[in-house]
Image (cartoon, rainbow, N blue to C red):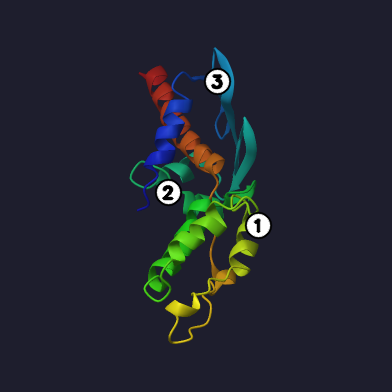
Amino acid sequence: MSDYSKSAARFARNTASHRMTVLHDDGLYRHLRFTNPDSSLYWYEITTTPGQLVFSGDGDTFAFRVAPDMFEMFRRSAESGGINPQYWAEKCRTGNAYTYSRDRFEEYVEKQVVSNEPFYPGLRDDVRDEIFDSPVYDVDHEPAAVMTVLGYEFHLPLGQNPDRRGPFRFSYVHAWELKDFDWWFLFACHAISDAIVKYDAARKAVAA
C-alpha cells in the first residue's frame, strides 16, 4: 500500500475549518458542499447521480464513472480506510489525475549519477551545476527537463582519463516515467473519502 500521509496531512490542514452542507440528498442523487465559513480557499462540492460522482471546487473538476452507487464504490475500494488513487484514477473520466513530478525526475537522475560517479569523478557536482542550479534550464517543467538531460554530456579531463572513456550521457531518457499523481487529484481523493465518512455519520445521527 502506498503512503499518502503527506497529502493526507496537507488536506487536513487545508480543510480543518471546513463545514459540510447537504444541499440535496435523495437516494443516489446527492449534493454536498464543504467550505470554510471564513475563507473561500479549498472549497469543494461533491455530487452524485446513478453511475457518476463529480468533484468540483477550488481547482480542476474530476468526474468518476463506474458503479450505480458511487459512494459505495469509494467505500469498498478504499485502502484500509484511506484512499486508492491508482484505482480511482482509472475510473476518472474528466480531469488530469497525473502531472509532471520533479521529484521523479531527480530520482532518475540520481540513480544514474550514483552508478556512474565511480567512473566519472566530479559527475555529481557537474550535474548539480549544469542541470539543477543552471540559470538556463528550468527542470520544474517536463519538456525543459527532458531536453536538458538529453543534451547533457560530462567529459573527463584528459589527465583523469587514461582509458580514453567517452563522455557520460544519460541513458533511456525517453523511458523515464516522470508523471505522478497531481496534488489536487490527491486532494480530491482525500476529500471524497472524508466526505463519505462525514455523510455517513450525519445520516446515522439523524436515524438515531
Query: In this rendering, does residue 78 appear at all?
Result: yes
Q: Amino acid at mark 2?
A: Ser
* Residue 29 vertical placement versus 34 (above, below): below
Q: Nearer the viewer, residue 15 or 89?
A: 15
C-alpha span from label 2 to label 1? 37 Å
C-alpha span from label 3 to label 1? 38 Å
Q: Which mark is residue 35?
A: 3
Residue beneath label 1, please? 144
Where residue 20 appears, x then y in whole percent? 50, 21
Where residue 62 appears, x then y in whole percent? 62, 42
Where residue 130 appears, x then y in whole percent? 56, 59
Disc 1 secondary structure class = helix
Nearest to the eye among marks 3 and 1: give it: 1
The quadrant in which the C terminus is found is top left
Left of 170 or right of it: where is 5?
left
Residue beneath label 2, please? 77
* Residue 38 vertical placement versus 79 (above, below): above
Determine the residue positioned at 48% across, 83% down.
Answer: 165
Q: Amino acid at mark 3?
A: Thr
